[in-house]
Amino acid sequence: MLQDYQVLRIPGPTPVPPSVNRAMTQAMAGHHAPLTNQIIQNIKPRLKKFFGTEQDILMVPGSGTSSLEAAIVNVASKGDHVLVISTGVFGHRYTEICESYELDVHELTVEWGQAFDVAAVIDYVREHPNLRAVYTTYCETSTGVLNPVGELAQAIHAINDSIIVIADGVSAIACVETKMDEWGLDLVITGSQKGFMLPTGLAFIAVSERAWKVIEQNKTRGYYLDLVKHRDALTNGTTPFTPVLSLFYGLKEVLDQLEREGIENVYARHLLMRDMTRAAFKALNVPLLVSDDAASPSVTSVKPDDFDAQAFRKILKEDFNIDVASGLDVMTDEIFRVGHMGYCSPTDVLQYVSAFEIALTKVGKRVELGAGTRAAQQIYLQHTTTTVTQ
Ligand SMILES: *Cc1c(COP(=O)(O)O)cnc(C)c1O
């Protein structure tokens, strides 16, 4: 097997496109150099449509979790009541961060593999009128569930206009349509290594006008993650601390790529990859964790009932150098997760599905070779409008 031929099909990090890797090798410039200012001014307006907002998108060095922490330390202070809706590992991470800041955190836990129920959350919010903020996860990457965060934000603000609603969009932004302003989400956050196809190291945070009022009045915003600092610098096309210029170079190239494809087509591609992947597993009689109506376009969780998930992953790795992810936490051995986000195309889906068929056979599952690939091909043909005339 070719040693450097590696197929990364985990739900982040995504592979980095070659053009983006090349862009990131450009020479360094100083923090306040004209070039640095130019690149920030170039990126700034182009990011907005991926969040569906007119607000500037703050860029803070750090992995995705730093954006979760920023959304907590800026919005709430010690003793404030906040609600975390936990649909898996990433939802629960908010709770851990909130506890570290000694917030009074309420956690609504939803069964893993299910999306939260808007009506149930609204009941809770009605009973707790003193909540400062509600923390939600758009795509819960540990299960592959897409939560109705937009619907929830609208329903919350219909009964209480002062609650700040936060969506962790780390595995959703630039994969799934997001309409922050229209839905009334107050903070939408992501990291660079998922839909944006970059290496890890940059967090993105969009903040609504309602949230800015709360943040400006908060006296304990911390230092490095103080969003007012980042906002004021960004207004002038700069950053409060040395910018991660290599990632900015890469991001500019990513935006070129995604704009050339067209944002609607980026979202359609992710939906197509989800549908192809799910059709393949269904045709192979391998159970999926999440129902069709809650399934994320960026990651698919599979819950085998007659073979060992870890043994399957081992064969994929040894035979093809394909990485799929295990489950996390309580689901570590129960599921495996296929990432189809960022630098991933329907061609890649056809490749991994056919490799899955081989690995399934080797792990002892009886499958008809080609059945999953055929199902994925059929979905592809149904979804694509181009027809070849003879
Ligand atoms: C990947 C991910 C994160 C962030 O993880 P980091 O390891 O800090 O980058 C947070 N939330 C979700 C939903 C994610 O998918």
Image: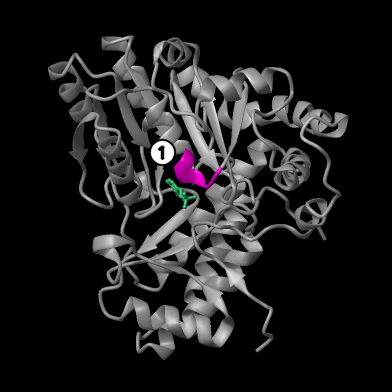
Q: Percent from the top left, x then y, of residue 53?
A: 58, 21
State yes or no: residue 223 in magenta.
no
In percent of the image, x 55 and y 87: which residue is there? 319
Q: Main secondary structure of the magenta part?
A: helix
Residue that mark 1 sits on: 138
Q: Quadrant of residue 15?
A: bottom right
Question: Ligand 1 near label 1 (Cβ, under 8 Å)?
Answer: yes
| Residue at the front extreme, as displayed | 223
Q: Would you say residue 35 is visible in this rendering?
A: yes
Q: Quadrant of the C terminus?
A: bottom right
Q: Quadrant of residue 80?
A: top left
User: Is the residue 258 above or below the residue 329 in the image?
Assistant: above
Q: Percent from the top left, x then y, of residue 69?
A: 41, 36
| Residue at the left extreme, as displayed | 127
- In depth, the one of 329 and 153 nearer the eye is 329
Q: Amino acid at mark 1?
A: Tyr
State yes or no: residue 64 in magenta.
yes
- In depth, the one of 39 and 363 nearer the eye is 39
Q: Percent from the top left, x then y, of residue 159?
A: 26, 11
Q: Quadrant of residue 130?
A: top left
In percent of the image, x 46 and y 25: which residue is there? 187
The part of the chain drawn in magenta is: 62-66
Q: Percent from the top left, x then y, of residue 348?
A: 62, 66
Side of 33 relative to 156 (left or right): right
Query: Mark 1: which secondary structure?
Result: loop
Q: Quadrant of the N terminus?
A: bottom right
- In depth, the one of 373 and 202 nearer the eye is 202
In percent of the image, x 45 and y 32: which residue is there? 70
Side of 71 relative to 112 (left or right): right
- In depth, the one of 362 and 181 nearer the eye is 181
